[in-house]
Image: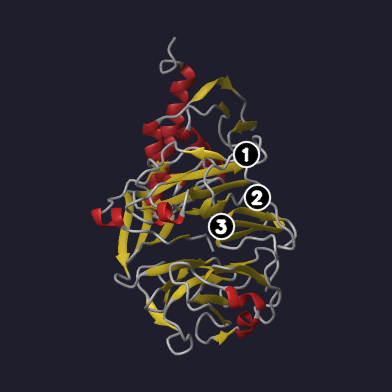
Amino acid sequence: MSFKNSQYYKSVNKVRDFMFEDLEKTIDLGKLVLSLSCVVNLLFLLRTKVQFEKMSTGCSYSSTFGSSSISDYVCWKFVSISSPRLNRRLDYFLLLMTILIAAMQDLLLSLESSKTGWKINESMKGTHPKSVTFDARNPNRAYCGTFGDGLWKSDDSGQTWDRIGRDAISSNNLTSVSVSRQELGKKVYVGTEPSALYRSDDEGHSWQKMSTLNNLSSSKSWSFPPRPWTSHVRWIELDANILDYLFVAIEAGALVQSRDGGRTWTDRVEQGPYDTHTLATHQKAPKRLYSSAGDGYFESFDYGESWKRPTAGLKHHYLYGLAIDPADPDTIVISASQSAREAHSIEAANSLVYRRSVGNDDGDWKAISSGLPESRGTIISILAASPKNKGEFYAVNNRGVYCSTDTGLVWRQLDISWSKDYLIQHPWALAIRGDG
């Protein structure tokens, strides 16, 4: 008997179709009342086909996502056999209510998942956005820093924007912005070119310059190679675990830190990264720092007092993007190139994505290509992890927006209209709205 004619296959499809129809009706009515176990079953039934091993009601199931307990429906043991048709139908449910904002070269591109596909909105045209972030505690609020047009704030998930900080922030060249994940959105930090840091304790209504940053001894050597007479705050990372711990990456010349909200600072350490582009902390890995830098990949397990360089498998050492699975601090994706020119120049673009997972393999970096565009002609990707779905990563580059729901192993391009203008634009930032 063929697999498709088997009783088990037919039964699973009946259950799947029943739940899919029921969920659609529920969404249409605006009353999402399905039980969690129903949703879990639906996602797995749609994502994979099953092997012939029926289990009893109220059992445990196993899958690529781990083990859990289900009591409402018949349980099955799953294997990861791809079904493109089912994956397309599943996109809506896996990415339900997902909102992304990508900072392209001269505009913001907002993407919102819906039952009929992705809704796209362009905004902030001509402002040259450089950084964008959502407020984790207020999911409708977002901030955007532009190069030349200052700081902007949105309270409708990036559909409309208002200029803020005009009189308090001395430079209009905003290069980084970060919002506290541990407080209700009141504390906001922004960085500028020339290098300066500002903090707001009232959601951006008033600002104070954290002047002691510029008193560090390393500040005399800070220099951005394309504009060597100046430098800028490339990244601001607010620690995921301890309030008022923050880390600031200067492009180029230093990774420095403060443990009192920016009042006092500790300068760079000798063996640390010199040119950090993206820095991350992780809620499940206190004291751990991850740095994707122009001078390679770095990790610290003691808040930057010492550093290691786990680079086995890496064949490209100019790094830019970085994202970590929120459920697993040992699963990491980065974007890489051979040089700054190949990373950022459309004429010479040549970049790719690497993945490392310490817990599931030998811990070496491995180049990932499944579902991603070919490296030649691809500007270096900006990466982000979903704050609400484990194992879910996003990437944006000049070729499109891509998503992985299996910890970065396999990717697929989002089904959106990609303008010819975007093909020659350099994305600079990517933000994903959380649940709040």
Residue 362 seen from this side: yes
Residue 290 screen position, x and y as percent = 63, 56
**Which disc, if any, is residue 329?**
2
Residue at 50 percent across and 85 percent down: it is: 205
Q: CA gap, disc 3 to disc 2?
A: 19 Å
Q: Is residue 162 left or right of residue 65?
A: left
Residue nearer the viewer, 244 or 348: 348
Q: Which residue is at a point 43% across and 28% down the rendered structure image?
A: 14
The crowd level at tag 2 (other Cα within 10 Å; few <14, some 14-19, many 20+) is: many
Q: Quadrant of the C terminus?
A: bottom right
Mark 3 or mark 2: name the one nearer the start of the chain.
Answer: 3
Amino acid tagged 3:
Ala
Give residue 268's mark: none
Residue 293 bears which disc, if any?
Answer: 3
Residue 77 vertical position relative to residue 247 in the rendered view, above or below: above
Q: Residue at x 46, y 31 (%)?
A: 15
Q: CA distance from mark 2 to mark 1?
A: 15 Å
Front residue of this view, candidates 245 and 92: 245
N-terminal-most mark, 2 or 1: 2
